[in-house]
Structures are given as C-alpha cells and as structure tokens.
Amino acid sequence: MAAPIPIDAKMLADVALLAALPPAVLEEAAGLARARPLERAVRIFDQGERAGRAHALLSGCVRITQSGSDGEEILVRLIGPGEIFGCVPVLTDGLYPADATSMVASLELSWDPADLLALMKRHSQVAINMVAIVGKRLGEAQERLRELATQSAERRVAHVLLRLLDQTGVHTGEGMRIGFPLRRKDIADIAGTTLHTVSRFVADWERRGMLISRHQRLTILSPEKIYRIAEGSAT
Amino acid sequence: MAAPIPIDAKMLADVALLAALPPAVLEEAAGLARARPLERAVRIFDQGERAGRAHALLSGCVRITQSGSDGEEILVRLIGPGEIFGCVPVLTDGLYPADATSMVASLELSWDPADLLALMKRHSQVAINMVAIVGKRLGEAQERLRELATQSAERRVAHVLLRLLDQTGVHTGEGMRIGFPLRRKDIADIAGTTLHTVSRFVADWERRGMLISRHQRLTILSPEKIYRIAEGSAT
DNA sequence: CGACGAATTTGCGCTGGATCAAACTTCTCC
DNA sequence: GGAGAAGTTTGATCCAGCGCAAATTCGTCG
C-alpha cells in the first residue's frame, strides 16, 4: 500500500459541498478525507453495491451511469472538479444507485459515510449545502425528463452539447472545445437516443461547419447555430 | 381574513421532513407554520414565481407540473399527505421550478422560507432529513429518465399505474383503487406520452379485465398482469 | 332534467428514429 | 509497423406511437 496522499484544507476550498464554511471545518473535513489518484477508465463503484465511501472529485471527470434490469443504460451525470458523487446513499438506503467510472486520469477524495454524516450533524451548513446540490440536480433531472418526453432527438442532442460546453468548455484557437473525450455512445446515453442517431446529426453538423470532431474531442465552432437547433427554431 | 387555523405539534408528526425530531422542535416548527385548507383545483404556486412559502401537505393530493417554453408540460410529481413541496428553492435560486395545483380538497402547511432555513440551521437533522427526501426524489427522477429513454410507452404506462397504486392504493371489494381522480392526460404527462396512447392501452386492459375505469377513478383488478406488462414479459 | 363542456375513445395516415447490417476509420498494444 | 479491437459512419427497412379528426360518453351546473 502506497503512502497516503497528504490532504491540504486548501484543496477542499473548491468543493461545493464545503462552500461558505469556516477554515476550521475545512481542516476537519480534510482530516477525515482520503485522497486517491485514478487512472483513466477506472471503475470507482458499482450500482447496487454497499456505499462504502462518499466521494468528491478534485480534478478530472467521472461518468455516472445507471442500468436497468434489461441492460439498457443511461448516463446519469458527468462529474467535474469540485463536485461530489456517491454521497446521497449515505442518507438513504446505503446502496450506490449507479456505476461510477473515471473518464480521464483524475483525483478523488472520499470520506467514510459515518464521518460525513457526523460532519453534517455537527455543521448544519454542510447539510444545507448538500440540499442545495442535490436540489439543483433534481431540477436538472426534471428538465431532462421534460426534454426527453417532449422534444425531438435532434434538439436533445444539441442541448447535450451546449450543456457540456457550458460545464467544461475551454477556448481554443478555432472555437470552444468540450473538456474531455466523449464517445457517440456517451452523448446518446445522455440524450436518450442511439449512437447511430447521434452520429448522423453530429456528422451533419460537422459538414455544415458548426463543429469539428477529432480524437473523441468536440470543438464547437458556432454555438449560436447549435443553440438555434436546440431551441427548435432551425432545422 | 379568517382566523388562523391552530396548529398542533401532533399534526407535524407525520411530515417526513420532521421525522426523528424531539417534540420541542416539532413545537417550534408548528409555531412558525401556517395552515391553509385548499379546495379542489386550486393553484398553490406558479412556475417561475418567487418562492414566498415552503409547503407541506397534511391531507389531500397536489399535482406538480412543469412546462417548457414551448408549452409542452410534464407531471413532475404527485404530492401526498406528509410530503413537502416547493421547499427546494429555499436553498437554491428562490424561484418555484414548477406549478402546484390541488387535485382534491386538501390541507397544507407552509413556512416562511427564512424561518425554514433558520430551522435547518439550528437543527441539522431537519436539513439531513431534507437531503434524504430530495435524494430519494432524485433517484426516482433518474429511474424515470431511464424508463423514458429505453422502454416502450405501454410498459411506462403500466409502471405509472403500479407506482400510483403503491403510493395511494386503497382496497375495495373488487381490487385496489388509486386514491384520487386521475385523467388520461395526467397519466400521459407522467409516462411521457399522449392521452390518446394512454387511452388505447387503458381501454385495452379494461377489455381484458385487468382494471376498471369509472368516474376518473381506476381500480386495478389484477396487479400481477399489469406488473408483467410493466416488466416487458407480456404483451 | 336538459344542455353544455370536458374527457374519452377510436380510426387513420404518416414519420422520426430504432434496428439491422456492413464498411470504414481510429486507437491500442504487441 | 501491423493486427486486432474499439468506435464511427452510412444505408436500408420497418413500426411504435404521434398528430389529426370525429364520434361518443361522462360530468356539471343552471
């Protein structure tokens, strides 16, 4: 076993769960946390497994997917730096509701569920932050539900690209690039369609000069045009 | 203005948000709450409106719907006795994310958002309960997303009936009845389809003797058959 | 009780997008 | 650098279920 990675309270400053907390609490949380570097494509936990740790991501990107009894799966969420994941079961049934896999080399922090619960008990602001985080995700999930129920696949795919761009977009010479490698299947699992359909639309948009797809990286050249598609005003 | 309805701490015992709390806290919450009887089909709040109150339902049933810019709407959730609603915005952007309407005559409790927030700050258990509630709903929303993305309309409609039966089913001489009046449109808005499609399936199932539909009330005669449809094992 | 409005049922045609199939490209690892 | 695996593109086909429309039943209220 390698020596544990030292955890600085400053590393926790960007974790949303611990926002607006006095330094002493950050120290306390740092003292309880365990850091772990992750290579690309590492399974962090499995759906249905007992939630042995509550997680936060310091850098990189983690894919959260859920699969049903029939094997069909959806991509529940992409976790970016500063976000928590696998924390809700601490307060519900204690079972991870989904799978988590690192998409690129990443650094995660984790707590013992009991420690996190105790921390929330002692410092209500931590619990309140968590309500805010989970509440925001609930709102997003409901918005996705509405989109899925009422909008065309094309609009949904466009929405997905815009949301990812917003979450992780970085400027490049040509335009804005989505910050991590993304397969057609990933996009499809978010948008609730098939990789074939996604491929058709993306290829079409690339032909029309709205974006460039290379090495599983997407660079959006004209977000406005994608936006118009997402809003249904254009074909 | 009518005289305020007196609020007994005992009335709060069944509110999930206040579960596992000492009587003193229930008293405190009761002191801050305001009770209001609601007739059938009363709009409680509107989507986008500033969240002026945080709500809990003591009896009856409330429909939470969300509509997009294009007018398409989904039924986000049905609130039953003991559940809270319109509470998340207290901790996020302060705007109700959806509409709320009473489906039958009901009794609601509500708090000033600042009071609720203060209560959560003082008693971390309240905040922790809220994480559990919101987390559970998030899980349900994600399950719905997966269903919507991967299953047929027929299976989804069957699932909706089973879930409603589970939530509010009451035994009758013939079978189990869903506890409140329900239009085809409501079912469609939950299942993410059209009222026409719902009508076809429900009429078909009624012909096959699985349920009875009368006066906007559904009585399920053989849940097992509906279950088999929901699981995809039957046609 | 009668009349109007709301909800439901049902038929029909059409299409978005899933499914199946196959070629092609790009990464990975030896 | 080459072989195999993984991911993408594209074509062809097909059907679940949506949209439209009309008939019918149910519920409500004067």
Image (cartoon, coloured by chain):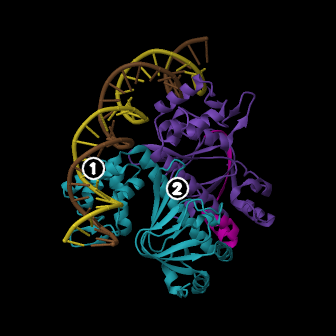
Chain colours: A purple, B cyan, C yellow, D brown
> Is A123 one of the magenta-colored residues?
yes
- Looking at the rendered structure, the kind of residue marked 2 is Tyr
For the image shown, how many numbered marks are present on the structure?
A: 2
Q: State the separation of the CA atoms marked 2 and 1.
A: 37 Å
Query: On the image, which quarter does residue B88 sit in?
Result: bottom right
Mark seen at residue B200: 1
Q: Which chain carries label 1?
A: B
- Residue B51 lies left or right of residue D21; in this view the side is right
> Dot 1 surroundings within 10 Å: few (below 14), some, or many (20 or more)?
few
Give the secondary structure at mark 2: loop
Q: In this view, does A21 lie to the left or right of A146?
A: right
Region rendered in magenta: A103-128
Query: Where is residue A146 drawn, in percent x and y?
Result: 49, 50
Residue B220's tag is none
Q: Residue at x 42, y 72 (%)?
A: B40
Position in image of residue A140 (x %, y %)? 57, 52
Work out whether residue A94 can be spotted: no
Q: Quadrant of residue A12?
A: bottom right
Residue type, numbered disc 1? Arg
User: In this view of the protein, which residue sits in the foreground, B93 or B127?
Assistant: B93
Left or right: where B127 falls relative to A196: right
**Within-10-Å neighbours for mark 2: few <14, some 14–19, many 20+:** many
Disc 1 element? helix
Where is residue A25 drawn, in percent x and y? 76, 66
**Residue nearest the viewer, comparing B119 with B55:** B55
Q: Closer to the observer: label 2 or label 1? A: 1
* Magenta-colored stretch includes residue B93: no
Residue B190 sits in quarter: bottom left
The chain identifier of the residue carrying mark 2 reads A
Residue behind mark 2: A96
Q: Is residue B171 visible?
A: yes
